[in-house]
Every structure is written in structure tokens, then in C-alpha cells.
Image (tube, coloured by chain):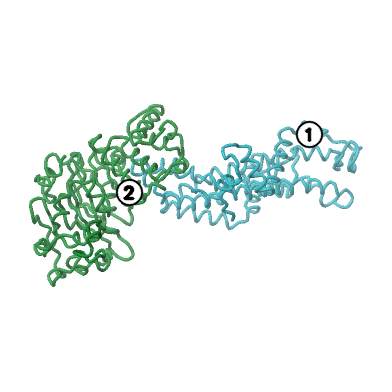
Amino acid sequence: MTSTNAATAPAANPKAATPAEGALLTVQDLTTYFFTRQGLVKAVDGVSFELQRGETLAIVGESGCGKSITALSLMRLVPDPPGRILDKSRIVLDGVDVMKLDESAMRKVRGNDISMIFQEPMTSLNPVMTVGDQIAEVLLLHQGMTKAEATAKAVDMLRLVKIPTPEQRVREYPHQLSGGMRQRVMIAIAVACNPKVLIADEPTTALDVTIQAQILDLIVELQKKLGTAVILITHDLGVVAEAAQRVIVMYAGRKVEEASVEDLFGASLHPYTRGLLASIPRLDLIRGAEDTSPGRLQEIPGIVPALHDLPKGCAFAPRCTYADERCKAEYPAYEEKRPGHWAACWKSEIVAGGTNG
Amino acid sequence: MATADHQAELTRAGANINSSWSRFTYYVRRYPLGAAGALIVIAFVVIAIFAPFFATLDPTTTNARTSLAPPGGQHFLGADFMGRDMWSRIVYGARISLMVGIGSTVLGCFFGVIIGLLSGYYGGWLDLITQRFIDIMQALPLLVMALLMAASLGPSLENTIIAISIPIIPHVARVIRSNTLALREMPYVEAAKAVGMSETKIAFRHVLPNTIAPLIVLGTAQLGSAILTEASLSFLGLGVPEPHPSWGRMLSESAAEYVRTAPWLVIFPGIAISLAVFGTNLLGDAVRDILDPRQRS
């Protein structure tokens, strides 16, 4: 479960033709398009990765880069129409080809084998049901428990996610709980059936900063306790550094870089990742502002290209300081630049030459 | 529409939110008209349930000697041309009015909710077809629709309830559908999908309970119009048949011939109808303000 294992094992090769042994979740060439009036939106375009047991994999990127659609695609919850996961996509969870399951079999997987924590704890709970009933609902659905057993388990789950006085809280409605507590309830629902994979889609974004750390700690702790593999979707690199072992950076629907957390933060090979890292406020740099840093946070110039109208070459080229004619004409190959460190950039050697941050 | 935060106001007033009595007095003071409406409705319900205690005479016994007796004495609201006691007939008429009113509203809401929920939640061709069908139904006024139904079903108490409930269905279906359209995009619906719940189960367990507030509002509003429709149908001779005393028919029997010579035959049933409708409408307005879905967090 250590990060070095995950990053250096051959299993980390995302383009491997056959799923490596031991990989819990294998995603190959995941492609989700939206057929809209504005045209074809390539929300997720050929994303491949593997998730090991007990591992935390972070998917980072700006808003609209396809990370949330990747998560929904794994659950096969992409709204259809307008969206569709193309048939060439392969999602294999613990030996089961999820893409081949019919809808009723898929329902047994959702919430049971793969579950999800959503971004909005304020609205992700039904306002007219008690939180206990909402936790019990999942157990009734998947575990074949009786109502009494499920309610008793709901209290245990609330205790597991560290909600004080669970016996009392179990009978309360969502509006009686704070945002942090609601997110804890959402986590309780997600882990109630002891899923193999837990997808956390920006679980801390809607919470205030002091609560964010608590929720993140809770996810990390539960993962250790339950042995669940976690896919952590976020745009917050601080969250990545704290919780994940391996990171995938997405840009405009594609994977642009993948590495262990140490490699990514230490020597990223893609200018977009460099840009993301440079845009994090750092206390040490602020303090030493007069000698080294320009004192102002660096931003990535420009905006994310519209997904229905991507440039011909590298999607990041228009915003990239390293870009030349080749970048604008030809999409860079996604290659293993260093052991266990993959990137899609023509200029990665030049990028690697510069200092990070 | 008032979007007052009652919870906050209650707290500011220093009231104990958990005490149902202080909550009750707060609402009475905040909505005096609604309280008056509730009082009228409760009075009618009590009179309807305990009709035998309130009626002074049998409402169906005829008596030639007291025909068209003016108010006073034994018949303190007078007697009709058959000598039947007006007060007793109005008291028993409350039973019919409320039975038809509540019966048809409940029936109409039940089918309206199912149609609206399925139409709104599943959308697609099902929605398209039901909505065009509802367009056609709504093109006809409530009374004309009820007339059509009553005439084709034939006069009886049950048929009157059915006839009045049918034009209520499209109203309810529309409101529930529009609510469902908004609710099915709520994150908790997506969260329910993510735990593997089936669409039908989500529709009934997660979406339906959230439409209850607008449904109560609509139901109370429809109650008044259902009572009025019953009176209108009976006035036109298509409603509840004899021997049930119906306010609407009491009016129609007397209006043409006796309105000049015995105005009490028209005035008192008229007052009963107006009061019942007025009361339910006042109550409905207050309920709408209190349960307005926009104030819910």
C-alpha cells in the first residue's frame, strides 16, 4: 500500500494491454463524449489508469477538465443523452467487466462495490428523510438486512465517521446538521457496504477550511481501517499531497501526467503541472519574498479551451510558455519519461531542466 | 409571496420552538385570516360529522302545513316549499359538500400525483403524450369538464365525486410535474443513483415526499373549488340526487319561483356555500404562505 510500490510496479503502466495482476480497478481507454448542439464535447478522451488495492489515487485538474465525468463514468452514471461512454472503453473492477453489465447488475455494483462521495453535502442528502433512514436505505438495498439491523448499523456507521451522540443524530434530519456533519453522513453512506473503491469527488470543496482537514483525515483514516481503494478527485494540490500516493493530472479531457506524489511535486514533467504547482500559495516563499520569489502567485495565462473546439495539437499549447510549432500541430505522445512517471509533452526534458515551483 | 423565516421569527419572539402551543399561537397571530379560515373549516367539519346533533328536525320529512314557513319558531331558518326544515337541510348538506369536496380532491390529487410524478421524472415520450393530453383537459373550464363527466356518468353521489375529481387531475399533475422536473436534478437524486437505487424507487422514495408541501397547498385550494363545483353541478341538476340535501340543489329548486316570496330559501344555502368556499380559500392561502417551498432550506 506504500506509494513507492504503487508508482514503480509495472502495474502502474496504464497502457498495458492486459490488466496486471493485483490491480483492483483497471480503466482502459475510457472515452466519454457529450453530443450537444454546440458539437461533440470530448469530456473524457481515452483515459487509462489502474488502481491498486488500498491505494489512494488523486485525479487533479482545473474545473471542466473531465475529472468529475471520469468519476461518473466509472459509476456509469453519465446522463445519457447527451453523454455516452464509448464502447471501446473498458472498466474492470476486481475481474468484473463493468461496461458489460446490464443496468440491474450495475445497480448492485453501485453503492456496494464502488461508491461515491459528492461535492455538495448541503444538497446531497434528502431533506425529508432522517439521516439514519438514508444510511439504512443503502444497507437494505445491498446487504439484505432487516429494518432493525440496518438502523442499528446506521448508528455504528455514524459512530465510525465520528459524529457525536450517534443514537440521537440518527433520528435527525439533514437541516439539523452542519455542513461538515452532513459530509460525514455522506461518507457513512458511501462506506456502509464496505465498497472496494470509494470515489471522492471534491469531498472538501464546499466545506470551510477547518472542516476540510477533518474530513480529509477521516477519509484517510477510514481507508486505512477498511482497506478501501480511494480515487480522490480534486483541484486542490494540498489535498493531494496530504492524502494520495499517486496522481493523475488531467487537462481538457486527457491525462497529461501521472506519477507518484513525490515525483510529481519534486520534478513534474508537464508545464501544466508546473503551472498548477506554481499557483499554490507557499508560506516559505512569502516570507522570503524579497530574495527569491517575485512575491506574487504565478498564474497560468489564458483559460481552458472549450471542449467542443479543441486545438489540433496539444490542448495546453496556447497557454504554454514552452510551446512551439510542433506542439501546436501534433498531440504529444503519452510516454514513460522516467520510471513510473508518465507525461504527454514534447518538451518534458526542457521542462525537467527548469527548477520546480 | 411571503417568504418569511418562521423559525427565525419564532426564536426572535423568544418562543420555545419545540412547544407546539407557542408555535400554534404564533401562526394564529401571524395569519389571522388563515386562522379564521381554519375556524370556519373546522366548524363545517364538526357540523358535518355530528349532523344529527345539530339538526333540529329530520331534513327529509315533508310537511304541507309548514310549506314556505318564514324563519322563526320551530324552523328558525324557515322551511322550503315541501315544508322541510332549512337549518336541518343545511346541516346535512354540509356532509354532502365536504364528502364530495374532500373525496374528489383526494381522488384527483392521487391520480394527479402519480401522473405528474411519472411524467416529470421519466420525461421523454411519456411526458410528451401525458402533457398534450393534459393540455386538452385544461382547455375546458373546470365546471364544463365536470358537467361533461357528470352528464355521461349519471347522477349519483359517487359519480359526482368522480366527475369533480377528473378536472382536478390535470392541475395537480402539472404542479407535481414541474416540481419533479426541478427535484430530479437535485444532488440527492444523483446520490441515490450512486448507491444503486432503481429509478422507480427514487421517484417514489426521494422525489415524491419532497412534493408534499406544494401538494397540500394545491389540495386546500382545490377543496374550495370542488365544493363550489358540486354546488354548481347540483344547481344544474347534474349533481348529487335526492334525497341527499345538497346546497346547490336547494338553491336551484327555489331560485326561480320563490326568490321574491321566500328569499330565505335562497339566502341561507347561498351563505353556507359562500362561507365554506371562503373558509377553505382563506385556509389555503395561509397554508401556501406557511409551506411555501421557497422558504425551505
Give x and y (percent) for residue A176: 46, 41
Please tell me which residue lies in front, A107 or B186.
B186
Q: Give amino acid for label 1.
A: Phe
Give x and y (percent) for residue B52: 77, 31
Q: Secondary structure at mark 1?
A: helix
* Horizontal side, residue A302 vs residue B41: left or right: left
Q: Which colour represents chain A?
A: green
Q: Quadrant of residue A285?
A: bottom left
Marks 1 and 2 sit apart, C-alpha to C-alpha, by 65 Å
Q: Chain of mark 1?
A: B
Query: What crowding class fits label 2: few (fewer than 14 Cα within 10 Å), some (14-19), or many (20 or more)?
Result: many
Q: Which chain is cyan?
A: B
Looking at the image, which residue is at 53% across and 44% down? B212
Q: Give amino acid for label 2.
A: Thr
Q: Which mark is residue B54?
A: 1
Q: Secondary structure at mark 2?
A: loop
Give x and y (percent) for residue A259: 15, 51
* Horizontal side, residue A285 vs residue B142: left or right: left
Query: What crowding class fits label 1: few (fewer than 14 Cα within 10 Å), some (14-19), or many (20 or more)?
Result: some
Give x and y (percent) for residue A211: 35, 46
In the image, which is nearer the foreground, mark 1 or mark 2? 2
Total marks placed? 2
